[in-house]
Image (tube, grey):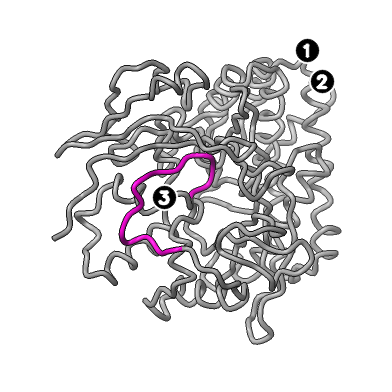
Amino acid sequence: MFRPVDKLQVSRRLSDGRKVRVGELAQNSREVFFQYDTEYLDRFHGLSPFTLFFNGEMQQAPTRPHNGLHGAFADSLPDGWGLSLMDQVFIRHDLAPNPVTAMDRLAYMGEQGLGALSYDPVSEFSPGEPDELINVTDLGKSAVQFFDGLTTTVTAALARHAGSPGGSRPKAQIHMSPGDARHASTVPKPGLEPWIVKFTSKHLPLGHQEGLCEAAYLTLAKNGGIEVPEWRLIDPPDDFPAPAWLALRRFDCPPDNPETGRFHMHTLCGLLDADYAQPSLDYETVIKASLSLCQSPAAGQAQFSRAMFNLFACNQDDHSKNWSFLMDDHGEWSPAPFYDATFSPNPYGEHTTGFMGHGKAPPLEAVRHLARLAGFKNWEEARDIIAQTVEAIDQWPTVARELCVQDSARKRVQRHLETIREQNRSLLTMSQ
């Protein structure tokens, strides 16, 4: 008989690898509650300053939008792709996913999730840690076959990626050798670095060109002065139609201690209890929350720059889970590197995050308001940032060719970029 988890101990991994107890999660038949540990309150810092009080009281989680969890802990769970894998693991154990609670899923995650938080006891359904190394190309083929609906079989290696980060696309968290992607593991090992590999499928909007296009977008963003994750391209198997898979180095792992150290990571979705599946945010909120959390004008200006990149680069799937923050051991917050930055047009050309209530082609005064809010001294300073961003995006044809993006995909993106630039030309007019 399946019995849902009723209590979980929450721990946090620090950047030096130490593991400290944070508190306890408990659930009854209807609600989930959390209480900080007294020693944690005395020595460390709050996990979620906007919605989770940093005190010793027992705090009830909101019913929505995180399936009855507090946002800080909901960020430990995947969505889309990861949940599909997890459901198949439960089904393989003759357990229908319906009675599985969000707490059960946290128990499944254990220490597998992104960020610094872990949960104990670990679920009996969670796969153990293997000693053997894995073949990334074989893992990728298994992932794509599952994603494409060609199989419902979840291999043992793939089951360990039921905790892969959010989004609907097939991906995996692995630990790779710096010089050889074939030498990898699903768990930390000495000499291996933590990466996320994004696989491709013919069912994605840009098909098997997705990896190359995202690599090109990350290059454009970096050229425009935006901080992005370190990335590399991985060769798929010879019989696979994709030219390359994109791997991103995990930024929740300190560069000087990637094996055991962690930074606490929190999405804006979790911080504000926003519904990422709906257009629930505005860039005004993104900038305000960043300034309040990070206590730095640089954070607001960085988010303004990213907003302008999303606008002019047609990254319209800019929902609340695509904005994250990192907290160090001293309680200092900073924006995480810019991720999921790629060509992603939405129906009707509307952004998921609005520009002062406008889903596309925001008027000049709306963007000027965002610039003032972000802390720019004057409009000329903000306009220079916009011009720098657009100049970088204009490099798309060159960068795409250098990365061997297929002509049809390159031209399709270029048509959208030209249309969007024309729609927003008032933001670049020098006389304003």
* Amino acid type, callout 1: Lys
Q: Earlier in the sequence, mark 3 or mark 2?
A: 3
Q: Is residue 225 visible?
A: yes
Q: Residues within 10 Å of mark 2 (few under 14, many from 20)?
A: few
Query: Residue 159 placed where, x, y %?
Result: 43, 66
Under tag 3, what secondary structure? loop
* Nearer to us: label 3 or label 1: 3
Q: Which residue is mark 2?
A: 381
Give the Cα separation between the discs numbered 3 and 2.
46 Å
Question: To which quarter of the image does residue 210 belong?
Answer: bottom right
Q: Which residue is mark 3?
A: 110
Q: Is residue 297 left or right of residue 56?
A: right
Q: Earlier in the sequence, mark 3 or mark 1?
A: 3
* Amino acid type, callout 3: Gly
Q: How many marks?
A: 3
Q: Is residue 279 left or right of residue 197?
A: left
Give the Cα separation between the discs numbered 2 and 1.
7 Å
Q: Nearer the viewer, residue 292 or 35?
A: 35
Query: Residue 152 placed where, x, y %?
Result: 37, 76
Residue 7 vertical position relative to residue 397 in the rendered view, above or below: above
Instruction: Magenta stretch: give its range.
Output: 113-128
* Amino acid type, callout 2: Glu
Under tag 2, what secondary structure? helix
Query: Residue 335 placed where, x, y %?
Result: 64, 31
Give the Cα separation between the discs numbered 3 and 1.
46 Å
The quadrant of the picture occupied by the C terminus is top right
Residue at position x 75%, y 69% in the image? 180
